[in-house]
Amino acid sequence: MSHHFQNYVAGKWVPAKSGKTVENRNPADDGLVGVFPDSAAEDLNEAVAAARDAYGRWRKVPAPARALKIQRAGELMRERKEEISRQMTREMGKVVAETRGDTQEGIDTAFYMAGEGRRLFGVTTPVELPDKFGMAVRRPIGVAGLITPWNFPMAIPTWKVFPALVAGDTVVIKPATYTPATVCELGLILEEAGVPPGVFNIVCGSGGTVGEAILGHPDVDVISFTGSSAVGRRINEVGGKNLKRVSLELGGKNAQIVLADADLDLALEGVLWGAYGTTGQRCTATSRLILEEKIHDEFVNMLVGAAAALKLGNGLDESFQVGPLVSAAQRETVHSYVDVGKEEGAELALGGEFYEEGECKKGFFYKPTVFLGVKPTMRIAREEIFGPVLSVLKVGDADEAIRVLNDSSYGLSSSIYTRDVNLAFRAVEDIEAGITYVNGPTIGAEVHLPFGGVKDTGNGHREGSFTVFDIFTEWKSVYFDYSGKLQRAQIDVEE
């Protein structure tokens, strides 16, 4: 397998015009994953020009025919699932069982969005005048600039790329600097699936250069970004000045509530998966655990013992359950929050250290960490850490649990474990989040349901499901007047 990758522009694989490259290395063992273009604005401009040129032709292709290309891409992804997944583990670190799930989510998205090509439903409606017909239809919006994160290198790009292409838009994507190889593989798949030149383009590079060039480019009509709230604010600011459609899926400080009547063994499985799956590097990761006082001590004992037993190592070895953090910088950030928690007076019950045993000393591993005695006002209870750090908060009852959960600037995912159906329905109504799980962890979204959050988690758009087309299409209202005469709406109507 070649370690040298290129940009994909106008149907050709090309280097950055400057000739500059950057290395990408495995966060588990520092092995070389690949050498990628270190692109600049001029590379982005060329890709946008190709996408703009292709747009006039692609939008005229019937939506079911566009969707067949996506269906074919899904079939190719299914054939190459293991290869894609193992490459993904090498470039971002999470265990291969999880990267298989990441790839499968891309496959599921392909097949779901292929079906949407025969829907893309509009509406028909009565009108107020005789011999007149009214309807509204979806139309493509233009060139979509996509900026994707490193924690789901296949799933999140496909969440954006596939609906954009089915909608009739053309795409320029800037993959995350830590995980460009998976997006390049997606480019090869779309090329083989028959997506025409210029319809899908890849420009590898940093956010400060390629990302900023996307934001300010006059021929980019819609921007879709997944990442931090801080960067999201910057994107919204620039996009707003240029009146661009902007979709933001941002951070989370997700909480799992466990009430006294819950199945504690089930709740334990949920929090282990939610807090330490993907080494806590998910926007939906369980970062807060809210325990009813009656079961607090018992559950903490269960949690600390089970978390301590998790095995850390290279994700390609299926005996391990937790991989590395994505980079040295990310590990330092996580560790700095552990120091913050100690300074704030929280009790460090587990972890809080680098893990450097055996082969792991070559990578960026961090021990699963548990803080007890956390107060809602502490930074470790309020700020997104994006690592395997869990803050445990004690509450008196369900009402207090929901108040503590809602006491956050974020509102992405949430979870409650209880056997009381009345409490469960009340929680679903009262929790301020875009996603709520009952007797399940805060992670595990499915592609046919809307994904997104409230407050600082985003700006109201939802990815996944048919709702994603509100990002990538425009509504157009159409009126047919077959009366043969001028009818003036709101004036000729008789009372």
Image (cartoon, rainbow, N blue to C red):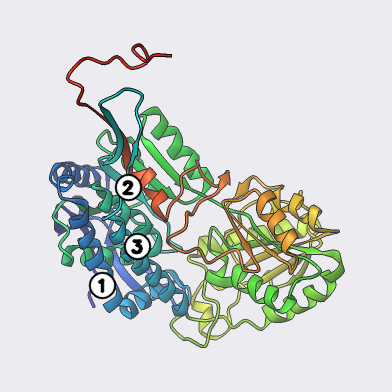
Q: Are marks 3 and 2 in contact (CB under 8 Å)?
A: no
Which residue type carries mark 1?
A: Glu
Q: Could you tell me which residue is drawn at 33 percent across and 35 percent down?
A: 216
Q: Position of residue 444 (x, y in %)?
A: 52, 67
Mark earlier in primary sequence (3, 2): 3
Element carrying mark 1: helix
Mark 1, residue position: 75
| Mark 2 crowdedness (10 Å alpha carbons): few <14, some 14-19, many ≥20 | few
Q: Position of residue 261 (x, y in %)?
A: 79, 70
Mark earlier in primary sequence (3, 1): 1
Mark earlier in primary sequence (2, 1): 1
Numbered circle sitting on residue 121: 2
Vertical placement of residue 213 versus 490, above or below: below
Closer to viewer: mark 3 or mark 2: 2
- Judge left or right: residue 287 versus residue 359: right
Q: Could you tell me which residue is drawn at 16 percent across and 48 percent down?
A: 58
Numbered circle sitting on residue 462: none
Element carrying mark 2: loop
Q: Could you tell me which residue is drawn at 46 percent across and 79 percent down?
A: 97
- Judge left or right: residue 157 versus residue 45: right
| Quadrant of res 374 | bottom right
Which residue type carries mark 2?
A: Phe
Q: Are marks 2 and 1 in contact (CB under 8 Å)?
A: no
Q: Position of residue 131 (x, y in %)?
A: 25, 26
Which residue type carries mark 3?
A: Tyr
The alpha-carbon separation of the residues under discs 3 and 1 comes to 12 Å
Q: Is residue 30 visible?
A: no
| Quadrant of res 343 | bottom right
Mark 3, residue position: 112
